[in-house]
Image (tube, rainbow, N blue to C red):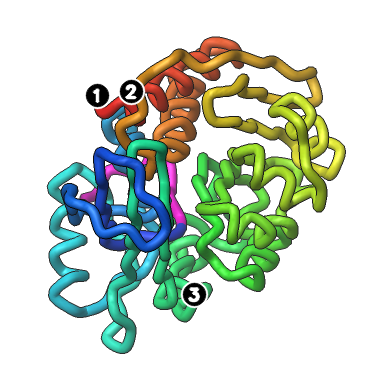
Amino acid sequence: MTTRPDILCIGSVLWDVIGRSPAAMPPGADMPGHIRRLPGGVAMNIAVALRRHGLAPALLSVVGEDAEGRELLAEARAMGLNTDHVHRSADLPTDRYIAVEDARGLVAAIADARSLEAAGNAILAALSDGRLGAPHAPYPGLIALDGNLTETLLAEIAHSPLFAAADLRVAPASPGKAERLRPLLGHPRASFYVNLEEAGLLCGTRFADSAAAAAGLHAAGAARALVTAGAGPVTDATPGGPITRRPPKVTLRRVTGAGDSFMAAHIAAECAGADRAAALEAALAAAARHVSGD
């Protein structure tokens, strides 16, 4: 692909293996259900959703020079994603994620992003060698950044001239990786998309609701904080003040990727000129469609 991207999606690109049971699953349960393998990873999920909204995203990540990596890139290209800048490694396998969901939501998940962590700043080469940017001419557009990167690399990004002009949209990937994002608190152009638990982990406390969490993140240095709370109200806090909206009620049919759908729809709405309230409502509608299985 040669079209200049509308947004860069930096982070995990892997295979998702999702098992789902229609019944509730207690610990140790062995239940009938359905298992799917599909392209996944936070950066990939956001890119796919952005493409559905009419944007042209490019992926910056790593895949192995194995059959799984070749198949994954072919799937990405078939969905209209720019894979020109994905790092290919002969020494690292393609990453994987496995999750089990039941009628109540996520039961358990394991993200194996060791190759992404091992590749380090090799995935950012296009931002420094002139293809997308350079130290004297940093990339000036939107970047969606996920917390599957190592804390060391995220700290480098927080202070790197390569990201000085970017509109950074940051997602933690999971509560277990939320604290990796702390180096980005204080970045003047970083917007954080987190859930209530992740906000608490970033701030070292617990919050009662999204309004308190967004205010806490803003006080901790986040230029902007968008905090979801499951079926509860969602808050967008900026220096201009917070706005809060309640998500529509839906029947829960899937969980994995809901936050990515929310983030992508929000970014796409703002790219189309929506104001803060309209963008937040568009994001909530997209997340509702995702979890309801539409």
Is 115 on the left or on the right of 21, as rendered?
right
Is 195 on the left or on the right of 31, as rendered?
right
Q: Where is residue 165 shown, x and y percent of the image? A: 64, 46
The residue nearer to you, when weighing 228 against 272, is 228
Label 3 SS: helix
Examine the structure image and report whether residue 109 is included in the region drawn in magenta.
Answer: no
First-in-chain label (3 vs 1)? 3
Q: Where is residue 162 shown, x and y percent of the image? A: 61, 59
Q: Where is residue 170 shown, x and y percent of the image? A: 58, 46
Specify few, some or many for label 2: CA neighbours under 10 Å numbering under 14, 14-19, or 20 or more.
Answer: some
Name the residue beneath numbered marker 3.
117
Q: Amino acid at mark 2?
A: Arg
First-in-chain label (3 vs 2)? 3
The residue nearer to you, when weighing 230 against 141, is 230
Q: Residue extending furthest bottom?
A: 91
How far apart are the alpha carbons under marks 3 and 2? 32 Å
Q: Are marks 1 and 2 in contact (CB under 8 Å)?
A: yes
Q: Which residues are magenta?
A: 1-10
How far apart are the alpha carbons under marks 3 and 1? 33 Å
Name the residue beneath numbered marker 1.
294
Say whether residue 238 is visible. yes
Name the residue beneath numbered marker 2.
289
Label 1 SS: loop
> Does residue 191 lie above or below 123 as drawn?
above
| Disc 3 versus disc 2: nearer the observer | 2
**Which residue occupies 64% across, 41% down?**
192
**Which residue occupies 27% across, 53% down?**
18
